[in-house]
Image (cartoon, rainbow, N blue to C red):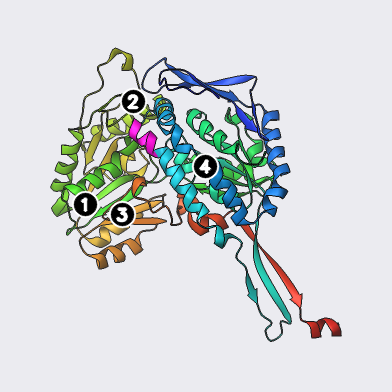
């Protein structure tokens, strides 16, 4: 694994299996989304045999790791995290180059990993908890209910916040007593691989492994009968494929999938600079490429102009450019395909007669010409049937839809395939609780929204096609455990049997 402070130098990463770094016969070439033709580095492309070896290594390490107490595992994991901050600047530079997002967000990506890891370790005292069911009429046994780990877990993360998202599940899986294989995103694997390998090197061999490569060669990470669970974060289509593959061995899954989050801005909403800054970040952080970003803004008709003007003023100050350049506030989209998709949504809304307003200036640097840059846009009062409303944009465009009544807003917010997150903007806490309770989604903010505002202690996950299962908190640990009940016959009953 190369280590350099030169942000322009190519980065090379290998596989890490069973406590050893391993090269592969082929590599993945990692493109820079902001600089056409530029190569950030190369990641090892695991073969099917490499993947089988990773599963075997994790399986072999499982009995000894599972035999430790949760407190013992937590101590080992705490030591493994030491020094992560020393590499944060370098990791952020690598992630910005391969992902496209601005340096600050890439830096926070690694910071959130550390925070989530430590929050998981704080749960160690609860992991091995048991309860006893005393004898009852007709039930002559005393039953102890305890938790046990599942076995080998595969964790698959997406390109947008790969390091932070990894820590929503990986430390919980390890703390619960499982061993793990991490699969970073094939288009942006370098920074994630670097972070995971540093930690894996400080854990017993095989407890934590990392493999990168083409999805076609990764199937055993999902379909192998030796894999007990797959935790996947990504698109709805990707989640359906994972679930289908896992079904062959009845492998369990946690799926954190796409969102079409509604922000409901009521008539009494506070729309000062602080709240408008929050709303803007909720929409446009990571150039709109976050599953829990606000994707539909429902605004009481009396406040529509204020919201439009507030967002427009902030978009006019946006600096579209290369993620590592000083002053850049909005980087490129990650892939040419996503740029084309989002541009298509804007063109369709324009052709349908919606009020579409674009902002900012594309970079003029010749080195960036042809990069995945796109001007952000507001789509005001579009037809609700347009794709910019019904589909997850995953880019810097947002529809703003006026409403007249609370019931109308809630019905529109819930009329979607998704159920990841939502938000209610109001000055009245009672109204916030009432409306929030009516939103069909897994997480609701009040007067706020977005990934950077997530309570990292709370369970997180979606409803409907936004996924199944929960991450974070003790619920996230229990997702990687199963119960075991041991029933003891009472002495008098045992003697008479």
**Residue beneath disc 3:** 423
Residue at 26%, 48% (x, y): give it: 297
- Marks 2/1 in contact by CB < 8 Å: the verdict is no
In the rendered structure, which disc, 4 or 2, sits on the residue that comes first in sequence? 4
Q: Element at badge 1? A: strand
> What residue is pinned by disc 2?
324
| Label of residue 299 in the image | 1
Q: Tell me which segment is drawn in magenta.
A: 103-108
Distance CA(mark 4)–CA(mark 2)? 26 Å
Mark on residue 81?
4
285 with respect to 141 (left or right): left
Task: Select label 3 or label 1 by which is in front.
Answer: 3
Q: Which image quarter is the N terminus in?
A: top right
Q: How far, Cα to Cα, is label 4 from label 1?
A: 44 Å
Residue 144 can be seen in this image = yes
Residue 352 appears in the figure: no
Using the numbered discs, state the Cα–Cα distance from disc 2 to disc 1 in whole angstroms.
35 Å
Q: Tag 3, which secondary structure?
A: strand
Spatial separation of the CA atoms under disc 3 and disc 1: 12 Å
Q: Position of residue 156 (x, y in %)?
A: 54, 39
């Amino acid at each position: 694994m190369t280590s350099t402070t030169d942000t322009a130098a190519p980065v090379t990463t290998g596989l890490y299996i069973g406590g050893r770094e391993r090269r592969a016969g082929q590599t993945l070439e990692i493109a820079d989304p902001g600089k056409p033709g530029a190569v950030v580095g190369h990641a090892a492309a695991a073969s099917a045999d490499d993947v089988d070896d990773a599963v075997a290594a994790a399986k072999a390490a499982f009995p000894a790791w599972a035999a430790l107490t949760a407190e013992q595992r937590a101590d080992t994991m705490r030591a493994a995290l030491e020094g992560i901050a020393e590499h944060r600047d370098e990791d952020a530079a690598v992630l910005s180059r391969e992902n496209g997002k601005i340096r600050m967000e890439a830096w926070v990506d690694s910071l959130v990993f550390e925070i989530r890891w430590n929050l998981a370790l704080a749960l160690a005292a609860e992991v091995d908890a048991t309860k006893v069911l005393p004898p009852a009429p007709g039930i002559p046994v005393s039953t102890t209910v305890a938790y046990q780990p599942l076995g080998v877990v595969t964790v698959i993360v997406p390109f947008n916040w790969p390091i932070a998202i990894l820590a929503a599940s990986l430390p919980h899986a390890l703390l619960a007593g499982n061993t793990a294989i991490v699969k970073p995103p094939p288009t942006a694997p370098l920074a994630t691989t670097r972070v995971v390998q540093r930690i894996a090197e400080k854990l017993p061999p095989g407890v934590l492994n990392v493999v990168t490569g083409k999805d076609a060669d990764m199937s055993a990470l999902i379909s192998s009968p030796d894999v007990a669970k797959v935790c996947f974060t990504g698109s709805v289509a990707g989640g359906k494929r994972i679930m289908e593959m896992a079904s062959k061995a009845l492998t369990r899954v946690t799926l954190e999938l796409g969102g079409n989050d509604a922000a409901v801005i009521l008539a009494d909403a506070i729309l000062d600079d602080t709240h408008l800054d929050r709303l803007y970040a909720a929409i446009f952080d990571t150039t709109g490429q976050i599953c829990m970003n606000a994707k539909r803004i429902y605004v009481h008709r009396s406040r529509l102009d204020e919201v439009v003007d507030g967002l427009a003023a902030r978009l006019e100050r946006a600096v579209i450019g290369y993620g590592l350049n000083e002053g850049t506030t909005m980087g490129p989209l990650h892939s040419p395909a996503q740029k084309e998709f989002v541009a298509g949504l804007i063109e369709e809304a324009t052709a349908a007669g919606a009020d579409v307003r674009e902002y900012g200036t594309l970079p003029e640097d010749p080195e960036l010409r042809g990069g995945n840059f796109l001007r952000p846009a507001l789509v005001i009062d579009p037809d609700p049937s347009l794709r910019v409303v019904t589909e997850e944009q995953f880019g810097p465009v947002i529809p703003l839809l006026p409403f007249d009544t609370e019931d109308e807003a809630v019905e529109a917010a819930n009329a979607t395939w998704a159920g990841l997150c939502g938000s209610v903007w109001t000055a009245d806490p009672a109204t916030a609780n009432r409306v929030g309770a009516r939103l069909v989604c897994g997480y609701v903010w009040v007067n706020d929204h977005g990934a950077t505002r997530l309570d990292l202690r709370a369970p997180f996950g979606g409803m409907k096609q936004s996924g199944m299962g929960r991450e974070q908190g003790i619920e996230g640990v229990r997702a990687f455990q199963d119960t075991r009940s041991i029933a003891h016959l009472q002495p008098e009953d045992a003697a008479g049997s």
